Image: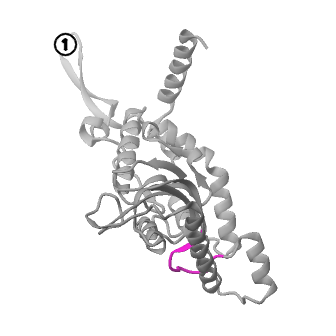
Amino acid sequence: MSYSHWFLVVDVIRSTAMALSASSAFRLLHGIFAVYKPPGMKWKSVRDTIEIKLLQELNSLQQPPPRQKILFLPQSNESSSATELTKVVTSVPVLADHKLVKGPSYTYMKIGAGHRLDIKSSGVFVLGIGSGNKLLTDMYEQHYTKDYTVSGMFGKATDDFSDEGKVIEKTTYKHITRDRLERVLAMIQGANQKALLIHSHVDLKSQEAYEMAVKGKLCPMMKSPPLVLGLRCIEFNPPNFSLEIRCMHETQQYLRKLIHEIGLELRSSAVCTKVRRIRDGPFTLDCALTHGHWDLQSVTNAIKDCKPIATEIFKDDLENGDEDLEGNEGRNIVT
């Protein structure tokens, strides 16, 4: 595509966006979507930044015209003999509707946060706008699993399990091999599989439990302690290593502590250097908007692209007996 053709396409997109009225654009902002939260940024700052940006762009679009009111205004009629005053019916705009009087048309937007990420973590962060807040609640109640890539470093321990904490111990790590690490990972995963069966509240000897386990549908029917469902090493270059972890009901601090405990099991110590969420239920990195795309057009497109996911979440919720899509809006879900 030539540069002139590319600029023409951009102009067409911009003119189309400007032609869309603010009210029409606002009606499209109902649903769920995912963004990529960078490390060092609080989840609330991510949400607030997106809200401010969307409100600014909505207020820059075409607004509805001011209402009109009818007034009887005096008008002079000059004749040859004298000047007569008569009242003429006149339509004038309502001053209260002028933007300089009423201010911005859009000042608030209900944006709910899904499973949160702490300030040190990065990755997939799901948000809901309007009716999408109820879908966040439905998503939370489905007990979806989440995937992370977590990096660690052998040889030291800190007071907060991260590489930024105060060092409280230094140890050797030359004796650690990949085979030893993987044996520890298998032990941890086995212990968590047993915990999963217990918290799923099914008869472990029943056919139902067997079929659910085969299909990978075993999950707690209510809030449970953090559970690790999958754990594998994807990089081993001592003292550095990286794991891919599939879990549920976790916090990012729990994952950092897990790295610390792995170090102890290997008769050494370890700190966590990175926590990155790569999947939250049906949302993956592929559908997460990066910081440069936290704008009205990108968010609207993301909500549209995520409609199949929203439909599936709603379908799963109906199968669990909840048919109230409109009720209980606006709950912000805490991991």
The kind of residue tagged 1 is Ser
Q: Is residue 276 visible?
A: no
In-image side of 316 versus 6 (left or right)? right
Which SS class for mark 1?
loop
Name the residue nearer the viewer: 159 or 9: 159
Name the residue nearer the viewer: 59 or 241: 241
Name the residue nearer the viewer: 96 or 311: 311
Magenta segment boundaries in residue numbering: 219-229
Give residue 324's position: percent from left, percent from top.
Answer: 60, 70
The picture quadrant where one finds residue 326 is bottom right
The picture quadrant where one finds residue 201 is bottom right
17 falls in the magenta region: no
Q: Main secondary structure of the magenta part?
A: loop
In-image side of 324 versus 98 (left or right)? right
Q: Please tell me how crowded label 1 is: few (under 14), some (14-19), or many (20+) other residues with Cα within 10 Å.
A: few
What residue is shown at x 47% (from left), y 27% (from top)? 18
The structure's colour scheme is one colour
Label tally = 1
Spot the residue most to the left: 82
Q: Which residue is mark 1?
A: 81
> Is residue 241 positioned above or below 212 on the image?
above
What residue is shown at x 48% (from left), y 34% (from top)? 21
What residue is shown at x 23% (from left), y 13% (from top)? 79
- Image quadrant holding the N terminus, namely top right
